[in-house]
Amino acid sequence: QVQLVESGGGLVQPGGSLRLSCAASGFTFSVYGMRWYRQAPGKERELVASISTGGTIVYAAFVKGRFTISRDNAKNTVYLQLNSLKPEDTAVYYCNAYKTTGTKSYDYWGQGTQVTVSS
């Protein structure tokens, strides 16, 4: 059974930090690319960061050096370090595992973890 379980969200003041984790099970984690998305109330889900199987990292423009994505294949876990948080970073953060093999694609999602940035 495939599972992605996010944790680490919470309430933080502007300028604060959080570290999100996403623990994967039920599939071969190391051969999947991993992404973090977020969805704010009333807005569409948007990509925050991605890390490929080879470690190539891409960030959304709004990250501007504040967030860091990483993965630990030994622990089947992907992380998202959130620094210098702003109220506009408030959203549910989701992790996503993806793989494309020939004509087949695989796409798994976690249930999300709430991040609220407020004073």
Image: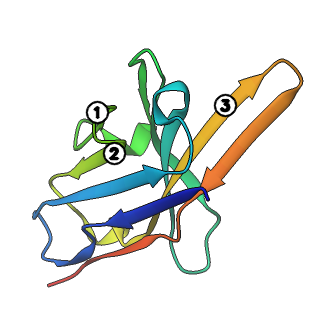
Q: Label 3 amino acid? A: Lys
Which residue, given by chain and number where applicable, does mark 3 sit on? Answer: 99
Residue at (54% x, 25% y) in the render: 31
Comparing 80 with 63, the one in front is: 80
Pointer 2 local density, CA inside 10 Å: few below 14, some 14–19, many at least 20:
many
Does 101 sit left or right of 47 as displayed? right
Q: Residue at x 38, y 19 (%)?
A: 55
17 and 111: which one is in front?
Answer: 111
Task: Give the residue type at disc 1.
Answer: Ala
Please tell me which of labels 3 and 1 falls first in the chain. 1
Name the residue beneath numbered marker 2: 77
Q: Which residue is mark 1?
A: 74
Q: Is residue 103 above or below residue 109?
A: above
SS label for mark 1: loop
Disc 1 residue crowd, few under 14, some 14–19, many 20+, Cα 10 Å: few
Contact between labelled residues 1 and 3, with CB atoms less than 8 Å apart = no
Q: Helix, strand or loop at disc 2?
A: strand
